[in-house]
Amino acid sequence: MMANHMLEASLVVTVGSTFAAMALWRFFKALDEHRQVSSLASKLPRLVCHGRPFAPVQPSHADLQVGQTSDGPLLRVGPMMLQRAQFNALWIRIGCLGQRIPHQALLRATIKLALEAQASFTFKAAVYVAVSERCLERGDKVELEWLKGQGF
């Protein structure tokens, strides 16, 4: 009987520790993503496009490792990838290379900042949001209605 109580107590501590560890991991992940969005405004001007593609080439895993495609550098914000294209357009890729869907707050903050940055040019520049078909096929929750409400 005593062994059962010890096992139950051990299980409660282990489960409690696991939940605490998961909550701590989520906190630090959210903090890291917040820092990425905060630094996005200073990083966007350095994001350039080589050549004149309407849409930059979709990155491969190798491109992701080096942080660049043949069209120019990649900028990662959480699981999203940002690239420049012709006329200084900004492409935000969601679900590219099997990346997870960004949290709602991260997606909204990134798009809000991108729209503000693109509107600050002498000639306003477009923002495109590319959502992977696989995300939609898997049923991942991409905020399509919110995106439509923002003009996408």
Image (cartoon, grey):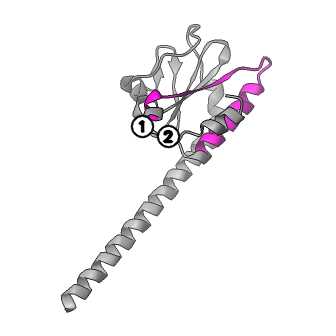
Residue sitting farthest toward the top:
52
- Disc 2, disc 1: CB below 8 Å? no
Give the CA distance from mark 2 to mark 1. 11 Å
Q: Earlier in the sequence, mark 2 or mark 1?
A: 2
Where's the C terminus, which quadrant? Answer: top right
Q: Can residue 27 be seen in this view?
A: yes
Looking at the rendered structure, the secondary structure element under dot 2 is: loop
> Is residue 39 in the magenta section?
no
Of tags 2 and 1, which is closer to the observer? Answer: 1
Left or right of 107, for residue 14? left
Residue sitting farthest toward the bottom:
1
Looking at the rendering, the stretch of residues picked out in magenta corresponds to 106-135
Q: Where is residue 1 in the image (x, y as percent from the top left)?
A: 19, 92
Which of the pair 54/25 is nearer the observer?
A: 54
The residue where tag 1 is placed is: 138
Task: Quadrant for residue 84, please give it.
Answer: top right
Q: Where is residue 33 in the image (x, y as percent from the top left)?
A: 55, 46
Whether residue 35 is situated above or below residue 9 in the rendered picture: above
| Residue at the image position 39 percent from the left and 23 percent from the top | 60
Q: What residue type is labelled 2?
A: Ile
Q: Where is residue 78 in the image (x, y as percent from the top left)?
A: 51, 40
Left or right of 139, for residue 48? right
Which of the pair 80/122 is nearer the observer?
A: 80
Q: Where is residue 130 in the image (x, y as percent from the top left)?
A: 55, 26
Q: Which mark is residue 101?
A: 2
Left or right of 75, for residue 148? right
Looking at the rendered structure, the secondary structure element under dot 1 is: helix
Q: Residue 57 carries which label?
A: none
Whether residue 37 is situated above or below residue 50 in the rendered picture: below
Which of the pair 23/152 is nearer the observer?
A: 152
> Is residue 124 in the magenta section?
yes
| Residue at the image position 52 percent from the left and 17 percent from the top | 72
